[in-house]
Amino acid sequence: MENSSSGRYPSASLPPAYLTPGSSSFTDFLRAQAPELLPSGRKLPEGSHVQAPHGTTIVAVTFKGGVLIAGDRRATMGNVIAQRDMKKVFVTDDYSAVGIAGTAGIAIEIVRLFAVELRHYEKIEGVSLSIDGKANRLAAMIRGNLDAAMAGLAVVPLFAGFDTEAPDPDRAGRIVSYDVTGGRYEENQGYQAVGSGSLFAKSALKKLYDPDADADGAARAAVEALYDAADDDTATGGPDTVRRIYPVIVTITAAEGAVPLSEERTAAVAEAVVEGRRV
C-alpha cells in the first residue's frame, strides 16, 4: 500500500525510521536518528568554561488539593543582569510543570524536549506516564547533560506534578528536586526551592508553609519566599511594580490540571506582598 503522504506529495516521503515501530521514548528515537539535536549531543572542548545567562530561584509548594510552582524572572551572567523578564516555569503536560535554575539556554531546551517526550509517550502508549515515570524521564535527561555541567553549564530543574492515582486527592501534589548528576529527590515536607536564592526562599517557606492552605494562600507564600530570596540574593529578581514584571506561577489541581496563574492575579498577589513589606 502506498504511503498517503508520498502519494499526495511525491517529494515528501518519510524516512524509514519514522515508519518503524520502536521505543515509546522520543529521546531514545532522537538519540538513534539525530543525536546532534539532543542538548547533550554537543561536545565542549576539554577544560572550556562558557559564560552564559543563568536562571536563578524557583520554589514549589503543595496545598490542599494540588501543588504550585513559581519562579522569579531575572537571569544573570556573572555580575550582569542578562534579562529581567525571563520565563523559567513551564507547563509540561496536563498535570505537571517544571521550573529551571542553572544555564538558561540548555535548561529551556531540556524542558521543551521533556514536554515532547511526555506527549510522544502518550501518543504511542495511549496512556500518560505515571508521576514517577515523568520524574524519572527528567532525571535521565539531566544525567545526559553531565559533561556540560562539568564545564559550568549545569541545569537544576524543579518538578511539580499532581498524582491522579493518589489515594487522597487533597494530598496528591508532588515535588521532586534534582542534582546536576540526575539524582532525584522527592520532597515530603511540602515545599522546596532551587537556585541561587533557594536558601533564603526555603527559610521563608519554613515559616509560611501551611499544608491546609488553598491555592491563593500557597501563591502568597511562594511570592513571599521569592521576595525574601531577592532581598538577599543579587541574582534573584523580586516583583518589579514599576516595569510590572512579576513571578510566573503555575498551579496544578485535579479539576483544572496545570494552569499558569493569570498576569492579573499574579500582579495582585505580588503587589499585596510588596505593600505588606513597606516600612
Image (cartoon, grey):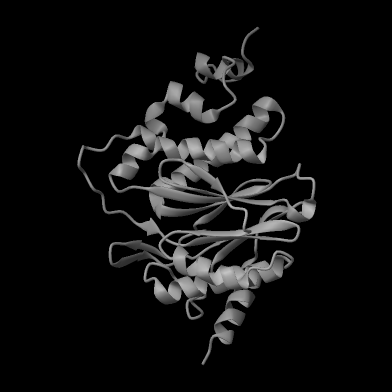
Left or right of 192 on screen, residue 212: right
Furthest residue in direction top, as rendered: 1
Q: Is residue 251 visible?
A: no
Q: Relative to 228, say whether 253 is above or below.
A: above
Residue 143, image x, y percentages: 43, 37
Between 96 and 263, the one lying in front of the other is: 96
Residue 263, image x, y percentages: 61, 68
Between 65 and 262, the one lying in front of the other is: 65
Q: Relative to 77, say whether 232 is above or below.
A: below
At x 60% / y 62%, what residue is drawn?
249
Residue 61, image x, y percentages: 62, 61
Residue 62, image x, y percentages: 66, 59
Furthest residue in direction bottom, as rendered: 279
Between 84 and 99, the one lying in front of the other is: 99
At x 49% / y 74%, what residue is drawn?
228
Q: Is residue 80 visible?
A: yes
Examine the image and state in which quarter residue 145 appears.
top left
At x 59% / y 73%, what residue is drawn?
207
At x 42% / y 68%, what residue is drawn?
236
Q: Relative to 127, say whether 200 is above or below.
A: below
